[in-house]
Image (tube, rainbow, N blue to C red):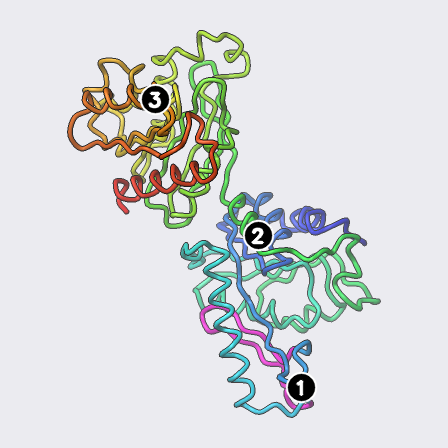
């Protein structure tokens, strides 16, 4: 079988792993090429996705020849045959390992954005790569999963040599591979597109891998959304978009990415159905939008503190809802918002609120200064110099993201 690319391989591999769909599974992709494959597996199984960072140990005078591999948590595999043939001693191995372990630690931090790894203790771990050649890196990843107290380890790859299962041995409890060709020479031989995976693609796969498509019931309406709860999240922020926008707003998604990177969960959802959006009166019905937000908040409510990030008219809906004493709102951020549309309810908002306004948005800036007086103590207003209403100027939205990140990490238990 020839796979079109790693995504095609991942989908076909996921079919072979369907028996794990109801298990408590964590999927670990081996960077870089194994991560896009693993992302498809994780999506099919409804499982969290993380990286199993592994580094090859190359023979000192012939780095492309692997004499072993190392993984996180001190796991290592040494190919004794290569070591003997290449006349490599323990000192050589230690020197190479020291260098590669530093690079391993750097990549783990970069790929996860500083977040801790997903816990695998007591769970079934599926280690995924885009294929196996010698098997050293895959075996090291399996050993690392065991060191982190995985209950069961499954090694899954789209293609491998005929004797791959014997090479893996007891390092995996189960070996899944749909293609074990006799004419195996290299992994790339079995892909039409085997372009190198970049670090950026790995990070993007991990970001998307923790995102779930959800549907929030609101009376007769069903509101689509995207929920992203990073491992170890300290809180979750609900985004409330402005008029004419949706959960796909590029500005809100930019801020959401920054919050996810800081270990905060996010929920972006549509406040209106497609049919409701055609009636412009609905877009400016702040009370109804706030009711929808309250419904989403109750749907989301759990162990994590909840914050609101509102933009434009969505900020008014966020403040309106935050004034409800029965809703568990711990913090609010408004971007270029119209807090004046929340009316008298502003005085009932107790959740710490940050109003962010562009310096070149004079009318909205004045409205926010007035709103800050109504909010009272415990709230703040920040001006982004030179920014207009949509914060389209270079660096303006980044400042918004940083201000929101700092506000939420402070007030959501950070």
Between discs 1 and 2, the one toward the N terminus: 1
Q: Nearer the viewer, residue 147 or 414?
A: 414
Give the x, y percent position of residue 341: 31, 14
For label 1, count other residues whose C-alpha is less than 10 Å away and answer few (under 14), some (14-19) or many (20+).
few
Tell me: 105 left or right of 299: right
Q: Which residue is farthest left?
A: 377
Q: Is residue 388 above or below residue 202?
A: above
Q: Which residue is mark 2?
A: 200
Q: Is 67 part of what is drawn in magenta? A: yes
* Residue found at x 53% / y 64%: 53
**Quadrant the N terminus occupies:** bottom right
For label 2, count other residues whose C-alpha is less than 10 Å away and answer few (under 14), some (14-19) or many (20+).
few
Give the x, y percent position of residue 394: 48, 38
Query: From which residue to which does the magenta span run?
Result: 66-85
Tell me: 154 left or right of 254: right
Q: Nearer the viewer, residue 44 or 40?
A: 40
Q: Which residue is mark 3?
A: 362
Q: Which residue is mark 1?
A: 81
């Amino acid at each position: 079988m020839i796979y079109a690319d790693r995504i095609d391989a991942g989908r076909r591999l996921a079919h072979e792993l369907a028996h794990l769909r109801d298990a408590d599974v964590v999927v670990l992709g081996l960077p870089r090429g194994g991560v896009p494959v693993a992302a498809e597996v994780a999506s099919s199984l409804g499982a969290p996705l993380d990286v199993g960072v592994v580094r090859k140990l190359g023979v000192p005078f012939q780095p492309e020849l692997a004499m072993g591999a190392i993984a996180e948590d001190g796991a290592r595999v040494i190919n004794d045959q290569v070591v003997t043939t290449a006349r490599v001693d323990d000192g050589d191995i230690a020197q190479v390992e020291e260098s590669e372990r530093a690079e391993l630690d750097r990549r783990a931090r970069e790929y996860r954005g500083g977040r801790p790894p997903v816990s695998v203790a007591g769970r079934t771990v599926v280690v995924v790569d885009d294929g196996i050649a010698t098997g050293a890196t895959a075996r090291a990843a399996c050993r690392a999963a065991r060191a982190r107290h995985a209950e069961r380890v499954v090694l899954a790859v789209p293609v491998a040599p005929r004797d791959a299962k014997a090479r893996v041995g007891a390092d995996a409890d189960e070996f899944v591979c749909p293609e074990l060709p006799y004419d195996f020479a290299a992994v790339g031989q079995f892909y039409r597109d085997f372009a190198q995976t970049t670090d950026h693609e790995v990070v993007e796969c991990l970001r998307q891998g923790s995102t779930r498509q959800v549907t929030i019931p609101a009376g007769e309406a069903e509101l689509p959304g995207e929920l992203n709860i990073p491992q170890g999240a300290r809180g979750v922020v609900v985004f409330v978009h402005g008029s004419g926008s949706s959960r796909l707003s590029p500005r809100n998604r930019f801020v959401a990415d920054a919050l996810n990177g800081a270990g905060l969960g996010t929920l972006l959802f549509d406040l209106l159905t497609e049919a409701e959006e055609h009636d412009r009166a609905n877009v400016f019905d702040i009370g109804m939008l706030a009711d929808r937000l309250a419904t989403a908040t109750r749907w989301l409510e759990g162990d994590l503190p909840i914050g609101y990030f509102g933009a434009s008219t969505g900020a008014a809906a966020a403040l309106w809802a935050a004034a409800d004493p029965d809703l568990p709102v711990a913090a609010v951020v408004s971007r270029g918002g119209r807090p004046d549309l929340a009316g008298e309810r502003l005085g009932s908002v107790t959740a710490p609120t940050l109003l962010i306004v562009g310096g070149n948005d004079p009318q909205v800036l004045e409205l926010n200064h007035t709103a800050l007086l109504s909010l009272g103590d415990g709230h703040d207003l920040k001006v982004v110099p030179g920014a207009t209403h949509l914060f389209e100027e270079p660096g303006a939205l980044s400042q918004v993201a940083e201000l929101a990140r700092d506000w939420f990490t402070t007030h959501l238990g950070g």
